[in-house]
Image (tube, rainbow, N blue to C red):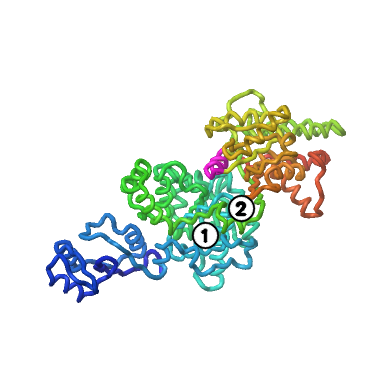
Amino acid sequence: MGREALADFRWSLAVGEDVLDEEEIAELVAAKAPLVRLRGRWIAVDPDRLRRGLEFLRQPRGTVVTAAELLVFAATHADDLDLPLPIVDVQVDGWVGDVLAGTVDHTLRPVEPPATFAAQLRPYQRRGLSWLAFLSRLGLGACLADDMGLGKTVQLLALEATDRAEAAGGEHSAVGPTLLLCPMSLVGNWQREAGRFAPALRVYAHHGPGRLHGKELAARVGDVDLVVSTYGTAVRDVEELAAYEWHRLALDEAQAIKNSQATASRTVRRLSARHRVALTGTPLENRLTELWSIMDVLNPGLLGSAEKFRSRFAIPVERHGSAEAAQLLRRLTRPYLLRRVKTDPTIIDDLPEKIEITQDYRLTREQASLYQTVVDDMMERIEGSDGMERRGRVLAAMAKLKQVCNHPAQLLHDGSPVGKRSGKVIRLEEILTEILAEGDKVLCFTQFTEFGEMLVPHLSARFDQEVLFLHGGVPRRRRDEMVARFQAADGPAVFILSLKAGGTGLNLTAANHVVHLDRWWNPAVENQATDRAFRIGQRRTVQVRKFCCAGTLEERIDAMIQSKRALADLVVGDGEGWLTELSTAELRKLFTLGAEATAE
């Protein structure tokens, strides 16, 4: 039973809430009176409308449609049909009824991921997996719109792992590959999370100048379970990608297709897949047409044409505040859109107290060029030195590379505008957009005062609100005032702090998000800063993001720290001094810029 399965339905005539049988209808017609007695009650009847209703019922018409058409028809109550009488009720049984009622995620049979899946799903995540699996079996598109931090990635990976395990168990024929599109900055994250939670999934990252084409691509696609690519790559390779029949098309950060006329949206519509899933914490940011664009990709025709959607929903809701139109839209989209929020007590009980996320991003071409220049220059100096001089140059090189990763202007000290020159700042803006849309507050830590000074005016203008900045030069009284304002319910929502000035001694529990913009390679120092929000008095789950660019020293030193923890649970020495003892060959490997570091 899928969206293309045939479904039969019939019309009935009702008076009030009573559905009439043939004999009762005949009696009404024969009476030819405006007032008749029916089932022990006197009923006022309009003979002309009754006649037209009967003629409608007796007209020969095809009542066999596809299940997808029936879902649209029943959900909208056929508003655009020329009906002689209003539709008062739609009665549907079975899975179609569950879908229309929007109760699928609570009434479904539970789906458990296979033993090869390495994550322990929380109850709400298991419900999400069951919901995704149900709609997938029917071929109906799904928008998983959980709050950021609730684990949309792990739910989709669980679905992919379950599909393959069921196919291997003989329940289904072989499952083809899934195509997942995401922003460039998240490609590495998907690869890493798949390796961590679903190691049995074979993953191929299709992006960058070295990506495969033609027969080589076809051979690789036929040998993997998950192809991770970017929206930009999909636009460039649309002819090749559209030639495949994908098992599933997954769209991460699906707000990338919120403009139906954008190139990415038109490209995605050309891709063929048995099932489509959108992942986004913000299915609606500014206009209702954004929701239409996403839903129309998932289930074409569900919300009608773009023009009909504007006249039926966008204009009544946005211009006139129509509660009726808004309620109808909720009813239409509810079956295919699952959103859980952190403020829901049934969800918060399932959550750990602290969620740690490695935040991927990519360097811009300007950053990559500067990075390589610094490496070439500093390695030449390091190779010709030893002792204290060598240690100093290693630390200087690391500081410069960190500055490049933050923003070119921080290294150049030229006061040039922030603009779109830093992949880290671009990703930060995307994260803050989502945090602020949820009404949350955030602490952003950096070890560079200069970087904070660059960010404050840029973010203030970008989000049209005050951004606080605490650093070592702020007097005590001013510091206390900032903390009090941030803690107030109506106070500023973004607080930038230098790691040393804001890392200890402050109580900032108004924030439930912590972002480490640049890494301090002593985990204890980072944890102390995180604990400004994650402490007694914090009643919400704290999400901690640590920026890390694949292919740069950020990723490699992070991996070294993790390996040290894993191997011997060693405490890394204070600061970065331990790194200065690495050999020149190890330093070269540490500093070398990887191809995956640069955005397309």
- Say which label, 1 or 2, has the lower sequence index: 1
Q: Give the amino acid at mark 1.
A: Pro
Residue identifier under label 2:
191
Q: Is 519 situated left or right of 86 in this image?
A: right
279 above or below 165?
Answer: above
Secondary structure of the residue carrying tag 2 is helix
Residue 395 in percent (x, y) is at: 78, 34
Residue identifier under label 1:
177
* Image quarter in which the N terminus is found: bottom left
What kind of secondary structure does the magenta stretch mostly adopt?
A: helix
Q: Residue at x 72, y 39 (%)?
A: 506
Residue 119 in percent (x, y) is at: 64, 61
Is residue 115 visible to the viewer in this orientation of the structure? yes
Q: Quadrant of residue 26?
A: bottom left
Question: What mark, if any, has residue 102 been given in the picture?
Answer: none
Residue reaching furthest to the right? 387
Q: Give the amino acid at mark 2.
A: Gln
* Image quarter in which the C terminus is found: top right
Q: Residue at x 52, y 32 (%)?
A: 464
Residue 485 in percent (x, y) is at: 62, 35
Q: Residues within 10 Å of mark 1 (few under 14, many from 20)?
A: many
Nearer-the-camera pick, 58 or 215: 58
Residue 260 in percent (x, y) is at: 40, 45
Report the magenta residues as a range. 429-439
Q: Residue at x 47, y 58 (%)?
A: 246
Nearer-the-camera pick, 489 or 141: 489
Q: Is 399 situated left or right of 151 in this image?
A: right
Nearer-the-camera pick, 226 or 349: 349
